[in-house]
Image (tube, rainbow, N blue to C red):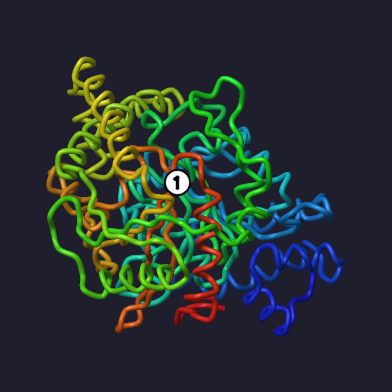
Amino acid sequence: MAEVTESFLRTYAESDGLGLAELVHKKEVSPLELVEAAVVTIEKLNPTLNAVIHKHYDMAREAAAGVAGDAPFAGVPYLLKELATSWKGSPNTNSSYYLKDVVSDFDAEVVTRIKKAGFLLVGKSNAPENGWSISTEPKLYGATVNPWRADLTAGGSSGGSCAAVASRMVPVAESSDAAGSIRVPASCCGVLGLKPSRGRVTMAPYADAWHGCAYFLANTRTVRDTAAYLDAVAGALPGDPYQPPVPDRSWLELSRRAPKKLRIGYSVTPPDGRGIDPEVRQVVFDTAKRLESLGHRVEEHNMALDADNAWKTYTHMSCVQTAAIFDWLSAVVGRPATKDDVEPITWAIIERGRATSGISHISDVEAVRQMGRAIALDLDAYDIFLTPTLTHLPRQVGFYDMSMTDLDAYNDLWSDGVFMFPFDMSGQPAMSIPVGMSKSGVPIGVQAVGRYGDEATILALATVLEQEMPWAGRRPGVSA
């Protein structure tokens, strides 16, 4: 076992993924030393945060010897989210008692790319059951808490990933998003979260999820790590249903280019007509003003969206595929799921999906696609559209209660994320950028939305904000 000094642990905590890989490239450290630094850090912090729910230290140690020394993230410790993505030999429970004994027997295509990029899997991050919460409090594994304040949610569904990245357990961790699950916890924990364009990252061996409204990428602390990760995992396979345009240069290179004079829209008016925290509103205003001072054309524009109707249609649509997935999983588990196998709100989702007719479902799909097109058209005049990530500061642990049985009442709790799901519907890339802090010391994210296929402009703008409104010096109370 490689020795880990206090000096090296400080270097590990202060470096992003590309910075750690550069040490490997220069042969100043080995991949095994990075793994051991991650192990020490996780063992120190995880008892408080509960961000890592499966530990794969020996798997990472064994794989360290085979890392290509010139890989972009050579030897960088990594967490996979406990939701959907298959890594051979790792549990794949979706944080559900029903799947508690399932272990993946194959690598998803994206995992093949992750391994090629040089990442080493040190564990899996906590997530709510089946990802259907914007907090991370599964009954199977317990709640992940916010490293900034233990009584607050770390967000969800990628709350384990974001808490781990914010606390410096790892610099990069997988995340996924169908109604804000990359961006919401990024805002809660003060890290970056890019939801890419529809189809940017293949879902192979599966073809689709939620009719193009589910997305996979990662959470990081630096823009360059997000850009380089996108370079590593992006790409559709022949026959994939969605294939966004591909730039002629790497996203890492494009992220470093100062953006041209942009037309930027912004809104602090939630499209469901509900309230917004004054501190959140002010952070959006401050961001817009800063960009205007840099020469960009900035104007207020409120979304032309009936968000209440859109959310009801969207959540109704999603129930059918959830029910279908559980029917398919019965062959994996060896028996059908029962009410006692899942959390109450999950059972309510399954029951509604089973009760929805095919005609009703295809009508929902068409309505969601039409609303998605309308959202994209409404914002097409803007190179970037700014919104709050969350309309309120992170809620108390327990606020998003999956023990509820009234599905409509549960879905109504998600109004804080009203600026999230529209861009899952429209397919546009959207990133939560941690530019703000509340008076009480809680991070506030601002969302930057781009045109379909244009992650480059978002990344370039985020690089500017990283310099103009820096967050690198902020560190939560629970961190390495």
Q: Nearer the viewer, residue 389 or 91?
A: 389
Quarter residue 41 falls in: bottom right
Question: In this picture, is 261 found above or below 292?
Answer: above
Q: Nearer the viewer, residue 298 or 225?
A: 298
Q: Which residue is mark 1?
A: 429
Is residue 122 shown left or right of residue 370?
A: right
Quarter residue 152 falls in: bottom left
Is residue 280 shown left or right of residue 217?
A: left
Where residue 434 appears, x then y in whole percent? Answer: 43, 68
Is residue 32 shown left or right of residue 110?
A: right
Q: At 40% from the left edge and 51% from the top edge, which residue is drawn?
A: 449
Q: Residue furthest right?
A: 27
Q: At 49% from the left edge and 28% from the top edge, which residue is drawn?
A: 242
Q: At 58% from the left edge and 59% from the top edge, which residue is drawn?
A: 172
Q: State whether residue 113 appears in this view.
A: yes
Q: State whether residue 127 appears in this view.
A: no
Question: In this picture, is 3 found above or below 95?
Answer: below
Where residue 47 appears, x then y in whole percent? Answer: 47, 71
Question: In this picture, is 287 found above or below 244?
Answer: below
Q: Secondary structure at mark 1?
A: loop
Q: Nearer the viewer, residue 51 or 319?
A: 319
Where residue 438 appears, x then y in whole percent? Answer: 32, 79
Q: At 77% from the left edge and 55% from the top edge, which residue is drawn?
A: 64
User: Amino acid type of disc 1?
Assistant: Pro
Q: Residue furthest top?
A: 359
Task: Count residues near mark 1 (Cα–Cα under 10 Å), then give few for <14, some for 14-19, many for 20+.
Answer: many
Say which quadrant the C terminus sits in.
Answer: bottom right
Q: Nearer the viewer, residue 12 or 279?
A: 279
Say which quadrant the N terminus sits in.
Answer: bottom right
Q: How many marks?
A: 1
Where residue 38 appears, x then y in whole percent? Answer: 64, 67
